[in-house]
Image (spheres, rainbow, N blue to C red):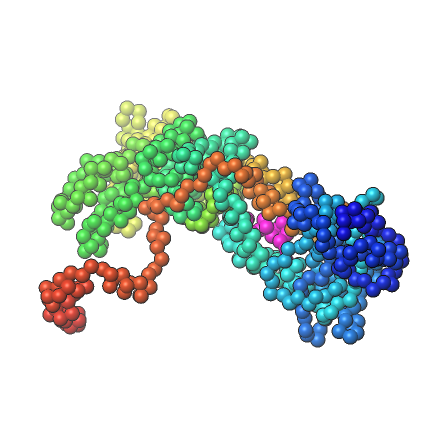
């Protein structure tokens, strides 16, 4: 057939739809010329083009929409046949099954539909009522001589060759879409209504499924568990079209698409925050186009540092991402005595250069130095105690002595040095190299050397950082992409700040229980009004001690200052140490030699004893540090979700708003059945309205676009920042798998042999483990003697 004849067919194919066919031709027949067909009797014919087809594999033009078709057929899917007795109501005759459904659901030949998607939706509803699944069949496009078919995929479903179908065509001149063919007979039993989700063509991920998969990963939940969770939320697996494999496949595709762009995407995410979010600071460093290090801190982190920068801690943690980049969070203590984040970094190695860059980035972001910063020593020293003899480590007297000496903040440096020397002599450790090295660094880690630094007792070790690292690790995974690591970090940070906001509100709106309400102890009441709940508990503890364990032995007025001696009774040991306290009644200045206020920012029990004795009703303002007060940080700083919206696309923001409004509507009518029914009816109508004239479905949106909506940044083919190769760090653990017994035996056989003095042969043992060695023979008996 020539191209001219082909064009003639294209121009005359749409003929009288009302006339019925009497010619014995079926859809799919081949023809050679137009004369083979009685045009007056056929509504339409389809054909297999066999000659003069230019590039039948020609792809759809980029500017061609999904609706730019001339013929579309919709056929039954390769459904799993139900051979049971139960099934949808249908009429059977000679192995032919005709669905028995409501008349208004049946489409008729020649029927006009408003849009292609509307026609598909109508047939989908018909198929759902009838009990079979559908798939889009062949779409013939006459304009560019291309023939496009649905690509088949591997399936465990049984193909039946069912001819039931519907066909739509579009009039190129009028753009009217009509039903040109409708076949309602099936050659197989139809499925039950509740089985339609089991048919593979009905498996599809909604946008909510896709977002759940990614968001579940922010709390370390994988695709399989996310599928279980989604099924539970939907009321059962029958209500969830997507399967577990659909969830896993989406996560696989997500990882494959984001993976090569990972470093570029995470940098782009943080740059967007820096450009759109007030006081957000982000810095990064490249090494030959490879991401080497980065540091970030938001406005809340900077505000927290401004209020609580007296003592901070930093400690590296590992296994938070697939590249083994080292995560280094900076930690402080807030007014609720809780750990808070004041910045974070990722570095590729643990060199002095990397840590120097990170600290410089930290200081340049916060503009001022902290009073004191704690950091863990080299990770290689974490097991350094093993350098001391094992029997000495197990000696409880030694451990007790060294702990009491090292962490005692009440002794002066000279006293510490004398007691250290006595301890080494007593346990014969003068020659121990590790202890000698640690003593040479004593001014960097022994608390007694920090006695004059304010708030030095707030953190004595990096245990706060280790606790913070453990908190972040709960949300992260060693297989994380950097993009997902940032999602994990944001989720953990959101939880941390939500807790801080909750404690702020509790301290502001409630009052704690007083220990001395009947004694009219005004100073305790005053403390409950100014301190946060957690800080007040610490203050109350000192007030309680002053009441029951302290008494004033004597008081002498010297140069206008009251010099008092306070005896403190230790409950466990019965000891009664004495403390000197000076007090100026005029300006209410009070100082105690225990330095408790210097260490912790809270007055000690000895000072409270004096204030109570002199009937001071309120704690002097100079001794109420801002860092322990209520509402020192505006609650507005603790909101994180709204601020990160600048990193999301407009679609994802609107989707979040739509979900939020829906939940509010349900919550407002949940206790009124009639209103709830009205809401359901309104939503049903809205759903039908929204379903009309919609050109795309979520399942037809390219997966790259879906992922870009989720991560909030475009995925470019031009990658300027590359991901680092896997880094081996001290804390990353061993990645080698456990060898089998066979592999161990082979390795042993290949091991070079050496001469044993016991048997005088070249073997894989020596005299120490020679089987006939008398000491080896007698060893089992010695154990039982």
The prevailing secondary structure element of the residues shown in magenta is helix
**In the image, residue 632 above or below residue 185:** above
On the image, the x and y values in percent for residue 695 come to 72, 46
Question: Residue 528: percent from the left, percent from the top?
Answer: 47, 40
From where the camera sits, is residue 492 visible?
no
**In this view of the protein, which residue sits in the foreground, 443 or 599?**
443
Report the residue that reaches farthest toward the front.
Answer: 2
Q: Position of residue 577 (x, y in %)?
A: 25, 42
Number of dots carrying numbers: 0
The quarter of the displayed image where residue 365 is located: top left
Towards the viewer: 442 or 407: 442
**Residue in the image at 36% along x and 42% along y:** 316
Position of the C terminus by quadrant: bottom left
Query: Residue visible at 36% across and 48% down?
Result: 732
Q: In the image shown, does 653 or 44 lie closer to the viewer?
A: 44
Q: Which residues are magenta?
A: 203-215
Q: Look at 34% across and 45% down and name the residue there.
A: 729
* Horizontal relation, residue 570 to residue 278: left or right: left
Percent x, y of residue 618? 43, 34
**Measured along the vertical axis of the image, is residue 534 above or below residue 309?**
below
Q: Is residue 715 magenta?
A: no
Residue at (27, 49) in percent of width and height: 383
Judging depth in this view, the residue of 102 and 579 nearest the camera is 102
**Residue 50 in view in this figure:** yes
Q: Is residue 214 magenta?
A: yes
């Amino acid at each position: 057939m020539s191209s001219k004849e082909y064009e003639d067919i294209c121009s005359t194919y749409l003929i009288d739809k009302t006339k019925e066919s009497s010619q014995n031709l079926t859809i799919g027949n081949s023809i050679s010329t137009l004369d083979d067909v009685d045009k007056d009797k056929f509504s339409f014919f389809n054909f297999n083009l066999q000659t003069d087809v230019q590039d039948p594999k020609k792809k759809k033009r980029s500017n061609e929409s999904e609706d730019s078709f001339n013929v579309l057929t919709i056929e039954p899917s390769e459904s799993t046949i139900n051979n049971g007795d139960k099934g949808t109501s249908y009429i059977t005759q000679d192995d032919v099954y005709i669905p028995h459904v409501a008349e208004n659901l049946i489409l008729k030949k020649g029927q006009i539909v408003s849009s292609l998607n509307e026609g598909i939706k109508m047939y989908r509803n018909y198929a759902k009522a009838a009990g079979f699944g559908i798939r889009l069949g062949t779409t013939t496009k006459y304009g560019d001589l291309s023939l496009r078919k649905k690509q088949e995929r591997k399936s465990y479903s049984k193909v039946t060759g069912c001819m039931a179908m519907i066909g739509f065509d579009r009039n190129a001149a009028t753009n009217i879409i009509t039903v040109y063919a409708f076949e309602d007979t099936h050659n197989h039993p139809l499925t039950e209504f509740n089985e339609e989700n089991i048919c593979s063509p009905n498996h599809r991920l909604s946008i909510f499924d896709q977002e759940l998969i990614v968001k579940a990963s922010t709390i370390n939940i994988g695709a399989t568990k996310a599928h279980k969770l989604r099924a539970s939320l939907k009321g059962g697996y029958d209500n969830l079209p997507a399967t577990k494999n659909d969830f896993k496949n989406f996560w696989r595709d997500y990882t494959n698409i984001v993976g090569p762009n990972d470093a570029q995407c995470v940098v782009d995410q943080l740059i967007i925050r820096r450009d759109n979010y007030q006081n957000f600071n982000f810095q990064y460093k490249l090494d030959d186009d490879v991401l080497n290090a980065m540091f970030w801190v938001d406005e809340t982190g900077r505000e927290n540092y401004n209020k609580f920068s007296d003592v901070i801690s930093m400690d590296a943690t590992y296994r938070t991402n697939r590249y083994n980049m080292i995560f280094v969070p900076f930690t402080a203590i807030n007014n609720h005595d809780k750990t808070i984040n004041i910045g974070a970094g990722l570095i590729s190695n643990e060199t002095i250069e990397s840590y120097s860059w990170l600290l410089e980035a930290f200081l340049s972001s916060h503009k001022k130095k902290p009073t004191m910063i704690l950091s863990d020593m080299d990770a290689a020293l974490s097991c350094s105690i093993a350098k001391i003899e094992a029997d000495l480590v197990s000696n409880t007297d030694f451990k007790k002595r060294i702990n009491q000496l090292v962490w005692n903040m009440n002794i002066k440096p000279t006293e510490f040095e004398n007691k250290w020397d006595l301890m080494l002599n007593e346990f014969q450790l003068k020659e121990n190299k590790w202890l000698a090295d640690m003593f040479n660094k004593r001014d960097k880690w022994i608390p007694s050397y920090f006695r004059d630094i304010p708030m030095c007792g707030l953190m004595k070790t990096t245990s706060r950082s280790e606790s913070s690292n453990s908190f972040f690790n709960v949300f992260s995974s060693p297989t994380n992409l950097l993009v997902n690591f940032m999602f994990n970090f944001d989720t953990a940070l959101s939880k941390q700040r939500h807790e801080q906001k909750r404690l702020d509100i509790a301290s502001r709106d409630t009052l704690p229980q007083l220990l001395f309400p009947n004694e009219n102890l005004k100073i305790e009441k005053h403390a409950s009004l100014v301190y946060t709940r957690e800080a007040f508990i610490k203050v109350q503890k000192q007030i309680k001690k002053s009441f029951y364990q302290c008494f004033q032995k004597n008081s002498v007025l010297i140069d206008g200052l009251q010099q008092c001696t306070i005896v403190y009774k230790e409950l466990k040991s019965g000891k009664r140490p004495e403390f000197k306290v000076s007090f100026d009644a005029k300006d209410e200045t009070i100082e105690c030699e225990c330095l408790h206020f210097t260490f912790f920012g809270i007055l000690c029990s000895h000072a409270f004893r004096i204030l109570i004795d002199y009937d001071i009703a309120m704690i002097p303002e100079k001794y109420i540090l801002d860092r322990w007060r209520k509402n020192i940080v505006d609650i507005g700083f603790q909101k994180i979700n709204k601020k990160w919206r600048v990193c999301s696309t407009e679609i994802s923001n609107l989707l979040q708003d739509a979900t939020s409004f829906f939940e509010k509507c349900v919550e407002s009518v949940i206790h009124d059945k009639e209103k709830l029914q009205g809401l359901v009816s309104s939503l049903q109508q809205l759903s039908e309205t929204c379903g009309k004239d919609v050109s795309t479905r979520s399942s037809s949106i390219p997966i790259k676009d879906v992922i870009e909506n989720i991560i909030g940044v475009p995925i470019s083919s031009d990658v300027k920042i590359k991901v680092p190769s896997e880094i081996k760090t001290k804390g990353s653990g061993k990645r080698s798998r456990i060898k089998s017994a066979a592999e161990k035996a082979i390795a042993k056989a290949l091991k070079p042999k050496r001469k044993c003095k016991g048997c005088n042969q070249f073997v894989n043992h020596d005299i120490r483990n020679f089987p006939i060695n008398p000491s080896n023979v007698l060893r089992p008996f010695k154990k039982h003697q």
